[in-house]
Image: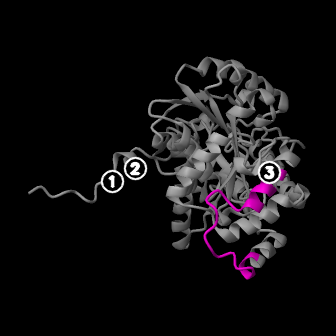
Amino acid sequence: MKILDTQKVSDRINSLSESASIAMARKSRELKSQGIDVISLSLGEPDFNTPDFIKKAAIEGINQNYSKYMPVNGYQDLRESISAKFKRDNNINYSANQIVVSTGAKQSIANVIMSVVNPGDEVIIPAPYWVSYEEMVKLGEGKSVVIDAKLENDFKITPKQLDNAITERTKMIIYSSPCNPSGSVYLNEELKALADVIAKHPQIVVISDEIYEHINFIGSHSSLASFDNIYDQVVTVNGVSKAFAMTGWRLGYIGAPQWIADACTKIQGQFTSGASSIAQRAAKAAVEANPSVIHEMRDAFLNRRDFILGRLSSIDGLELNKPEGAFYVFPDVSKFFNTSFGDRLIQNADDLCLFLLDEAKVALVTGNAFGSPECVRISYAASMEELTLAMDRIKEALSKLS
């Protein structure tokens, strides 16, 4: 009798790559637990605490006994508050029924992909892209079509690039603005030009990932769904993790065409049901607040960006854009490829990140994970003290390569 190998995981899981940012953060924690002084600039997590008014709303939710099962797509009053937020901040009209609240924006994106993409469908993803987009497309059995957005174009794709990438099998486009990992922000006129291309292909659904909306240094944020000619094709993804320093609360949401919202509610009902009841009470306070309440955090990130850019620009061999949002810089490090220190050869960004971890005790994330193998991602969601020391260490370590 044949004995089944119960320890063999599915082909689906074997096809997935581990999140590079999570893997590097885990390695940093392991080294720290061994007493090694590692500075981790790998995770996209604000180093601020959740604002007190949001914590107060959560406590009130506990005291009011929000402890029962909630609607799968989120409490009605939270969805109404999100609807009002979309009108206030984004000039988009989504009814409460078009909104689905999930356990983080990551689940929101996965829900949409699983609800729309069929096996073999093509999904266009501009690179650099957030690490999980391509892996989620794999789970949906789609085919990723990557467009290389060049540093010289501020890591933003052109309408011509998008038009050339679209085929009869294109089902979806996924992008973020402000972008993780590049920090690039699409201007209104740039989005309008892309919208005019998308409008020619009504079968395409676009996921517009706007989770970094309020960490924006140019004074305005534009949403793709605000253009009437493609409103019915766009799913807007957002949440409270980044702007309100609520990563651990796990609360994201979408505004979407009704058929997609219904599909996401259906799939979520079978996987997780509704997001945490207490996180929803906290999120209601966050989305109802005037965005000015987090300007102090945004301004701190801006100061850190300027500091990091100043320090990195003094290092020969790095090429940089000027990120206008989020809290990352994404330098091109390819001039350090085929260099060495002792018997250690640097052939690619993976090698360079491991070299900096070993030699400088600073954890970064390889650009390979973001579809841009010539780059590395540096998160400046850390204290100025840590950033100063990290920049000193990186500069010294890189000076040893020749």
The Cα–Cα distance between marks 3 and 1, rounded to whole angstroms, is 41 Å
Amino acid type for the residue under numbered disc 3? Ser
Question: Which of labels 2 and 3 is toward the front?
Answer: 3
Q: Residue 219 appears at what percent x and percent y?
A: 90, 43
363 or 64: nearer the viewer? 64
Furthest residue toward left: 1
Q: Camera-side residue: 15 or 392?
A: 15
Residue type for callout 1: Val
Against 88, residue 195 (above or below) is above
Label 2 neighbour load within 10 Å: few <14, some 14-19, many 20+: few
CA gap between label 2 and label 1 equals: 7 Å
The residues tagged by marks 2 and 3 sit, at their Cα atoms, a distance apart of: 36 Å
The circle on residue 284 is none
Element assignment for label 2: helix
73 sits to left or right of 79: left
Label 1: which residue? 9
Q: Residue 237: horizontal and vertical position, in percent?
A: 69, 46
- Residue in the picture at 74% in, 29% down: 230
Q: Quadrant of residue 49?
A: bottom right
Element assignment for label 1 = loop
Taking the spot 67% from the left edge, 44% from the top edge, the residue there is 181
User: Of discs 3 and 1, which sits in the foreground?
Assistant: 3
Q: Are marks 2 and 1 in contact (CB under 8 Å)?
A: yes
Q: Position of residue 197 (x, y in %)?
A: 71, 21
- Asked if the residue at tag 3 contacts the one at tag 2, i.e. Cβ–Cβ closer than 8 Å, the answer is no
Q: Can residue 108 be found in the magenta stretch?
A: no
Q: Nearer the N terminus, badge 2 or badge 3?
A: 2
Nearest the camera: 231 or 19?
231
Q: Residues within 10 Å of mark 1 (few under 14, many from 20)?
A: few
Find residue 212 and report its horizontal and vertical position in percent.
75, 49
What label sits on residue 83 in the rendered view? 3
Reply above or below: 60 against 303.
below
